[in-house]
Amino acid sequence: MQLATFIELSKEQILAEAVAYARTIVSLKDEEEVVLRNHLPKVLAAIAADLRTPQSRTESIEKSHGIPLAMIGHEETAAETHGLMRARSGLHIEQVVAEYRALRSCVLRLWSEAETSSPGPDTVRDVGRFNEAIDQALAESVRVYAAEVERWRQIFLGVIGHDLRTPLNAVSLTAEFLTRVAPKELALPTERLKRSVSRMASLLDSLLEYNRAGLGGGMTIERLPVDLAVVCGEEVELQRDAFPGTRIELMVRGDTGGEFDGSRVREALGNLVTNAVKHGLPAEPVAVRLEGDESSVRLAVENAAAGSISSSEMELLFEPLRRGAVQRLGSDRSHLGLGLFIVRQIARAHGGEVSGHCESRKVRFTVTLPKGAPTARGSNEL
């Protein structure tokens, strides 16, 4: 008997075993059978239909490489809906994968037990096509599951970042009040409190920017005529005050005027300098170079490092909530790992880019910004 026919005729027996396995999962053990079956009947129907569909060698290879055969804009598949529902039921990704593993084993075991004839070429073909179909369904479920989990993670981070604002503002106002009325012996701890509040506000800003980008909102900028030499000069002075023990050098060359969001550029520079101070060698200076030509401005921040960073590790540093090689070089664990991610978002919102390079134990990040807006003037959102 062909495997597609067996699946269609034995669907209820297969589903009964699938439901029995689903009841062993803590998140599902008290659910009704309709929830446990979920979209598995349609998944089985789709697998049977796939087995009956002629498939060329090229199509088989493309499917194994994850290239979908369906056209863009197709309706959500049963496997995608199954993954979405399992995510909303609170299952872990390992449990979703285990469901498919159990389903695969169940179908092949029941089919082999029902077969009376010796396996032939068609049997081998059916098993191969069945495994392809199961893998395709699993990939669809996992993709949608991961997207749903990430969506709720972003919502959670957004709620946390928003709700922390109120108590933080109360602490900030209290610190300002103490600055005015506290006796001199409390001046130092009061100033330390203000700096801590400022640091917390900065962390929340970074968290909310990451959250907004993760939810597809992008980053909004407002382009205005500005000379980045002035903007960056002001930020470097601020960073010198923040890190009095580090020598921060600023070198400017060429025409650095253009249409930029000066506040965002300052934010990017502040993140780069802070990153350089925290992860660079304390006795070595941080070099800030600003260079402009007719079409763009390049902003580079360089620091000496205790070790080297490979190109693959360098790229990971731009990923949010990742520290990669920097952590191994003795980094501060108290930050969120969002600084370089925010820098990249700012650069891309301007139509530019940021790159990192490490050579001879010198780490350099370079932001390239076009002088003019890639679209209309004013507010841009990418």
Image (cartoon, rainbow, N blue to C red):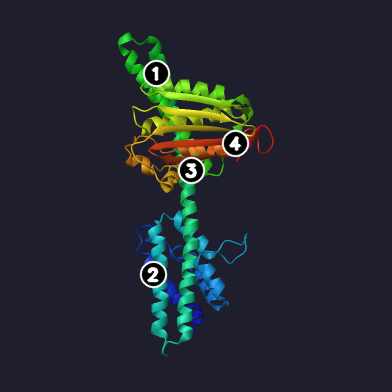
Q: Amino acid at mark 1?
A: Ala
Look at the picture and state if 45 lies above or below 117.
above
For residue 246, what is the image quadrant? top left
Q: Which residue is mark 3?
A: 155
Q: CA distance from mark 4 to mark 1?
A: 36 Å
3 or 4: tag closer to the N-terminus:
3
Q: Which residue is mark 2?
A: 102
At horizontal 41% and vertical 85% (from top left) the residue drawn is: 114
Q: CA distance from mark 2 to mark 1?
A: 59 Å
Q: Which residue is mark 4?
A: 350
Q: CA distance from mark 2 to mark 3?
A: 33 Å
Q: CA distance from mark 1 to mark 3?
A: 31 Å
Look at the picture and state if 12 lies above or below 297.
below
Is residue 42 something that shows in the picture? no
Q: Amino acid at mark 2?
A: Ala
Image coordinates for residue 319, horizontal then vertical, percent: 45, 44
Q: Which residue is mark 1?
A: 175
Graded by Cα atoms within 10 Å as few (under 14), some (14 to 19) or many (20 or more), the crowding at tag 2 reads: some
Camera-nearest residue between 161 and 263: 263
Disc 4 versus disc 1: nearer the observer: 4
Image coordinates for residue 235, horizontal then vertical, percent: 49, 23
